[in-house]
């Protein structure tokens, strides 16, 4: 059935009425469903109701009952992303902004308000700003980064390995991406608990978010000034020195874009992958030969639990049509990553193993497609692999159905991931994994990481050799050479 054409801006279009039998709650002005508040606690269910009622593009209400379209279809999301002539990310075009329907105190404002950053830019300006970011990324030594992720994992595991218990969300997943990003950006000494807390707090739009933002920006502007004074071999220097001629303010803002885009999404991905690894029978049943490797578990998780469930918003630059809905110039459309990933037209069986298929929407697509996806994947692949190498007997310390999640329109992430294992001694983080991974999974259901799961793709990379132990550092010059080797020099 072709859904009744609606305009979420609710002007001269016919209004929708709730279909017969539709529960009254969850329905706001003009009969539109709410994507916020108590009625939307299970957003996945709301999206499926919308899909059944309206098809792949549905009208709905954001916070403060601001009308919006939510794109639910995989194909329609891709069509929107790949048609920059019709859809863009410049919120100044949104009718709700222009006519004041979206109030300045709307809790979503920090995510929507236009800023002079690549995420909101279009055309030549997008090419200039994003080009500086992607050029700076291309110069990253990916082998060195993988070694650094391995080493940072050893450091984090050392902090809890002697206790036999840990919460892998607060003690691992929330830290590893920050350590790695601080190193990549060029500020390894700035990594600390305060920065992790500020990065977690900043996107929440709470009162403390302003102080958190000020803290993060202070760190990044000091880095910008230092690199303007003296260039080094790091991401910040490459942004400062880029021929696009970014001002100090633009450099600072883009360091924040990269830090925040990388941090939140990768922390969620790590926690989600670890949950898959600990609970999914496809990962656990390795003896049957039907195993899932760590990179496959990452891709499966990017389909089932995308680290960012939606992006707010894309905006129509002209009257157009999407998913059989008439879209008006100035309408806002939510990029529905989570609902697009479970579109029954591309995934008729949600339990099917996606076997490393990468055509999910987790990294978006089109001109704004995430430029840091290889780094995000590397942190998850190498981090999980190195963790399993250190703690091959890792087990969930609660029932799977006791795991708690926190959800918003932006993401759904684990609150805690309690695990137990036999206590282990600390290990020299510079030495690489000391325990060879078992060739096969133990039959008692504990999690190990068999040889084919080695996340490091380059077989010649020293970090990919888990049994390698350093020779005694007393040999002349060896320690320095080892240091260089770990740093990827
Ligand atoms: C698993 C981890 C990650 C996920 C799921 C993810 C996902 C996304 C998504 C959905 C977008 C929005 C695209 C749009 O507006 O349509 C995005 C943008 C972006 N991401 Fe990522 N990201 C991840 C990791 C990273 C990392 C590690 C970096 C940097 C090293 C990064 C840098 C960026 C930047 C700079 C943008 C803005 C691009 C633009 O607007 O042109 N991301 N990411």
Image (spheres, grey):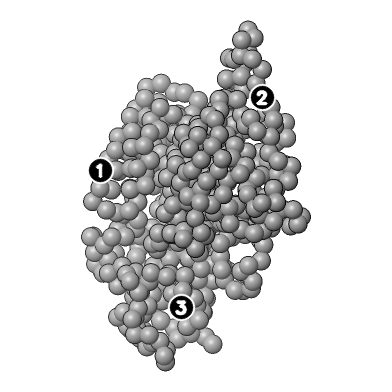
Q: Which mark is residue 193?
A: none
User: Does the rendering let one see residue 246?
Assistant: yes
Indicate if the residue with disc 2 has its beta carbon within 8 Å of ligand 1: no
User: Does the rendering let one see residue 141?
Assistant: no
Residue that appears at 65% across and 33% down: 435
Provide residue 271's location: percent of width, then percent of height: 50, 50
The quarter of the picture where residue 75 lies is: bottom right
Provide residue 159's location: percent of width, then percent of height: 46, 34
Provide residue 20's location: percent of width, then percent of height: 42, 92
Question: Label 1 belongs to which residue?
Answer: 211
Q: CA distance from mark 1 to mark 3?
A: 38 Å
Question: Label 3 belongs to which residue?
Answer: 50
Q: Which element carries disc 1, helix, strand or loop?
A: helix
Question: Label 2 belongs to which residue?
Answer: 469
First of labels 2, 3 by sequence position? 3
Q: Nearer the viewer, mark 2 or mark 3?
A: 2
**Vertical placement of residue 420 versus 245, above or below:** below
First of labels 1, 3 by sequence position? 3
Q: Which element carries disc 2, helix, strand or loop?
A: loop
- Residue that lies at the very extreme toward the right in this rendered image: 289
Query: Could you classify mark 1 by the number of other residues whose Cα lies within 10 Å: few (under 14), some (14-19), or many (20 or more)?
Result: some
Q: CA distance from mark 2 to mark 3?
A: 56 Å
- Front residue of 142/388: it is 388
Residue that appears at 62% across and 38% down: 389
């Amino acid at each position: 059935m072709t859904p009744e054409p609606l305009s979420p801006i609710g002007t001269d279009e016919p209004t929708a009425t709730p279909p017969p039998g539709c529960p009254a709650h969850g329905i706001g002005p003009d009969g539109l469903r709410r994507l916020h508040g108590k009625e939307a606690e299970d957003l996945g269910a709301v999206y499926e109701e919308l899909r059944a009622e309206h098809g792949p593009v549905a009208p709905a209400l954001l916070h403060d009952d601001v009308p919006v379209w939510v794109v639910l279809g995989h194909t329609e999301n891709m069509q929107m992303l790949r048609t920059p002539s019709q859809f863009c990310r410049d919120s100044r075009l949104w009718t709700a902004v222009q006519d004041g329907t979206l109030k300045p105190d709307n809790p979503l404002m920090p995510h929507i308000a236009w800023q002079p950053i690549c995420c909101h830019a279009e055309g030549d300006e997008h090419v200039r700003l994003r080009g500086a970011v992607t050029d700076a990324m291309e110069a990253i030594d990916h082998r060195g980064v993988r070694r650094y992720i391995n080493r940072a994992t050893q450091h984090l595991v050392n902090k809890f390995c002697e206790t036999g218990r840990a919460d892998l969300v607060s003690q691992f997943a929330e830290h590893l991406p920050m350590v790695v990003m601080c190193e990549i950006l060029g500020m390894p000494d700035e990594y600390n608990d305060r920065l992790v807390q500020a990065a977690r707090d900043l996107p929440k739009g709470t009162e403390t978010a302003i102080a958190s933002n000020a803290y993060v920006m202070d760190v990044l502007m000091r880095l910008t000034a230092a690199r303007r004074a003296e260039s080094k071999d790091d991401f910040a220097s490459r942004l400062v020195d880029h021929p696009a001629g970014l001002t100090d303010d633009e450099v600072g803002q883009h360091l924040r874009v990269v830090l925040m885009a990388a941090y939140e999404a990768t922390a969620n991905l790590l926690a989600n992958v670890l949950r898959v690894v600990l609970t999914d029978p496809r990962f656990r049943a390795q003896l049957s030969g039907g195993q899932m490797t760590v990179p496959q578990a990452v891709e499966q998780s990017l389909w089932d639990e995308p680290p960012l469930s939606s992006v707010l918003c894309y905006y129509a630059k002209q009257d157009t049509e999407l998913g059989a809905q008439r879209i008006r110039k100035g309408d806002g459309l939510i990029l529905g990553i989570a609902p697009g990933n479970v579109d029954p037209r591309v995934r008729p069986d949600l339990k099917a193993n996606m076997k490393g298929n990468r055509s999910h929407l987790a990294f978006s697509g089109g001109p704004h497609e995430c430029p840091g996806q290889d780094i995000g994947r590397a942190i998850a692949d190498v981090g999980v692999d190195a963790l399993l190498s250190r703690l091959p007997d890792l087990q969930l310390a609660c029932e799977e159905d006791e795991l708690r999640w926190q959800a918003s329109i932006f993401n759904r992430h684990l609150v805690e991931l309690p695990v137990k294992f036999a206590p282990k001694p600390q290990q020299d983080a510079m030495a690489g994994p000391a325990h060879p991974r078992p060739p096969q999974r133990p039959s008692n259901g504990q999690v190990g990481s068999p040889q084919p799961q080695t996340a490091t793709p380059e077989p010649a990379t020293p970090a990919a050799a888990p049994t390698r132990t350093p020779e005694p550092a007393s040999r002349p010059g060896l320690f320095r050479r080892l240091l260089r080797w770990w740093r990827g020099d």
